[in-house]
Amino acid sequence: MNFGYYTDENYTNLGVDNKELNKGEYELCTFSNCNLSGYDLSGYVFTDCEFINCDLSNVKISDAAFRDVKFISCKMIGLHFDECNLFSLSFEFMDCILDFSSFYKLKLKKTTFRNCKLIQVDFVEADLTQAQFVNCDLQQAVFERTNLEKADLRSGFNFNINPETNNITKAKFSAQGLSGLLMKYKIIVE
């Protein structure tokens, strides 16, 4: 299969109408209503692209590049972002389901997660400096040796972050979210 270069294209219903996504580099492209669940996107390159209302669950993304990519209203269960190409890795997530995904050891400075479900997501050793978790469900998300310096979790909920094993310097939390920092101590906060 040839490696193609595609720019300024709009793709709709890929995987739904038996349309395939050619292996290649995609720049300034929009993917709408695509069902790529289970696809192998290993080695693909996405730059300044948007995925809107797509199912990307269990997609293989080994060495895939995501540079300034926006995911909007996407289902992305079980993705291993830690296997991506790290060069210029940057993305934004809005209204997405990212349950059971892994961001292990990734540098995600200033990454925005807005209205996302992040249940049992692995953030172990990730650098989330100045990341924003706006109205995000972080139930059973794993934070261990994670850098959350200046991160904004004021509207995040259901998180359990141990201040002794994570860097939370100047991170922002709401008064309601303080219980998520105290769970280790088995204190009841009402």
Image (cartoon, rainbow, N blue to C red):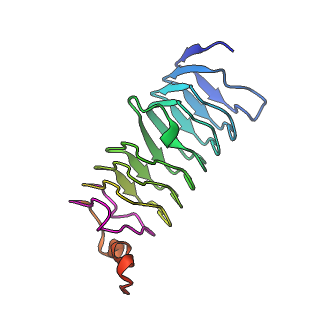
Question: In the visual, does 152 lie left or right of 75?
Answer: left
Q: Residue at x 42, y 51 (%)?
A: 113
Look at the picture and state if 37 lies above or below 176: above
**Residue 179: image location, x then y, percent:** 36, 77
Q: Position of residue 112 (x, y in %)?
A: 38, 47
Q: Is residue 171 left or right of residue 111?
A: left
Q: Magenta stretch: residue 50 in it?
A: no
Range of the magenta residues? 151-170
**Residue 31, above or below 97:** above
Q: Is residue 161 magenta?
A: yes
Q: Main secondary structure of the magenta part?
A: loop
Give percent across and percent down for residue 19: 74, 26
Question: In the shown orientation, is residue 107 left or right of residue 93?
Answer: left
Q: How many marks are shown on the rendered structure?
A: 0
Task: Write the residue at 56% across / 25% down.
Answer: 44
Q: Quadrant of the C terminus?
A: bottom left
Residue 135, by quadrant, is bottom left
**As rendered, which of 27 and 9 lies closer to the eye?**
27
In this view, 172 is above or below 37: below
The residue at the point 51 percent across, 27 percent down is 46
Q: Nearer the viewer, residue 77 or 43?
A: 43
Residue at image point 66% right, 30% down: 12
Residue placed farthest to the left in the image?
170
Q: Could you say where residue 161 lies in the image, as x and y percent from the top left?
A: 37, 67
Depicted 45 relative to depicted 117: above or below: above
The quadrant of the picture occupied by the N terminus is top right
Which residue is nearer to you in this view: 39 or 123?
Answer: 123
